[in-house]
Amino acid sequence: MFQRIQNWLASRTLCNKLTLDRDVGVVSFSFDDALHSACQGGRKVLERLDCRGTWYIAGALTNQVASGRPYHSVSDLEELVTMGHHIGCHTYSHQACNRLTVRELDEDLMRNVEFFKQIGMPFSDLHFSFPFGVFNCASKRLAATRFKSSRIVGGGIQFGSADLNGLRSVQLYQNSIAPPTLSALTKDVATDRGWLIFQTHDVEDAPSQWGCTENLLDYAIRAALDAGCKVLPIDQAIEYFEKDKDVCHQSSS
């Protein structure tokens, strides 16, 4: 309950509003923790439909294994970047941000930035995702000073405007969302020209409770394209809504 109250308070303060007033709605696909199956199978599903996604990386998870599922390797990340996907920060140690002091969190964030530099990915404009979707006012304030955007877990579709310091998302989990719901969501985005960010973890035939199959991911992408939405990673979606520059256009197929 206390965590929910923290999230509620933080979601209503320190907002950085992005107006969503373009002619076409946007759907983004994001992957937390960057498990190996998402880096390989997930990206290939996106690429097969000429789309790109966002992967949020916690350096401490590199080359690790949990419950028999391997996380990303450095070569996985290199392939993602080479193929035009977007890499974001997910802290280094993958701890809940509300359990760290501001100093501890700042040190952890900077450690992940150093990790990126050490593997040859010195990003100059980073985006962030709060581990476990947990945050409070202090962590949201700090993230706002370090990142172009910060994504949370849950909250639904964004219509009219989006808080760049707390981008909402919809969980693309195999056992919690069905194809008809996916179709309805993407049609809503297209009709009201909003921004829907899907969030998942592993992508495999027998996914965890936080993951999905390649078939479900494929269905979601096709539903977005068929509805007339653009499918863009987080950074390009923000550029599109900011109208800073022309980004690649997606059409239904």
Image (cartoon, helix red, strand yellow):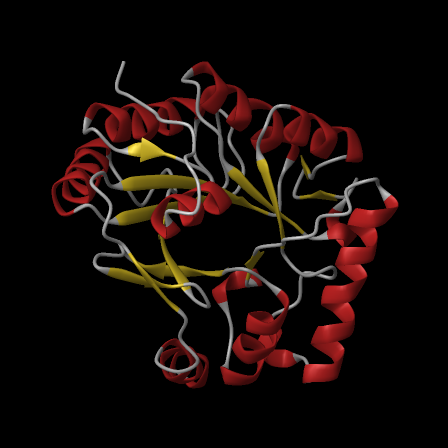
- Residue 239, x across and y down, in percent: 44, 46
Above/below status of 108 relative to 185: below
Q: In front: 84, or 5? A: 84
User: Residue 102, position in %: x, y?
Assistant: 68, 83
Quadrant of the frame with the N terminus: bottom left
Residue 132 vs residue 228, the one in the foreground: 228
* Quadrant in the rendering for residue 101: bottom right
**Front residue (pair 185, 18):** 18
Above or below, 206 against 34 in this view is above
Residue 228 pos. (x, y %): 21, 28
Q: Is residue 5 left or right of residue 43?
A: left
- In the rendered image, the quadrant that contains the C terminus is top left
Residue 104: quarter of image: bottom right
Tell me residue 210's x, y (percent): 47, 46
Residue 59 sits above or below residue 155 on the image: above
Q: Is residue 44 left or right of residue 63?
A: left
Side (left or right) of 192 relative to 212:
left
Q: Is residue 209 visible?
A: no
Q: Give the residue displayed 51% in from the left and 74% down from the top.
A: 135
Could you tell me if residue 32 is visible in this image? yes
| Residue drawn at (24%, 27%) of the image | 223
Farthest right residue? Answer: 118
Give the quarter of the image for residue 27. top left
Residue at the image position 87 percent from the left and 47 percent from the top: 118
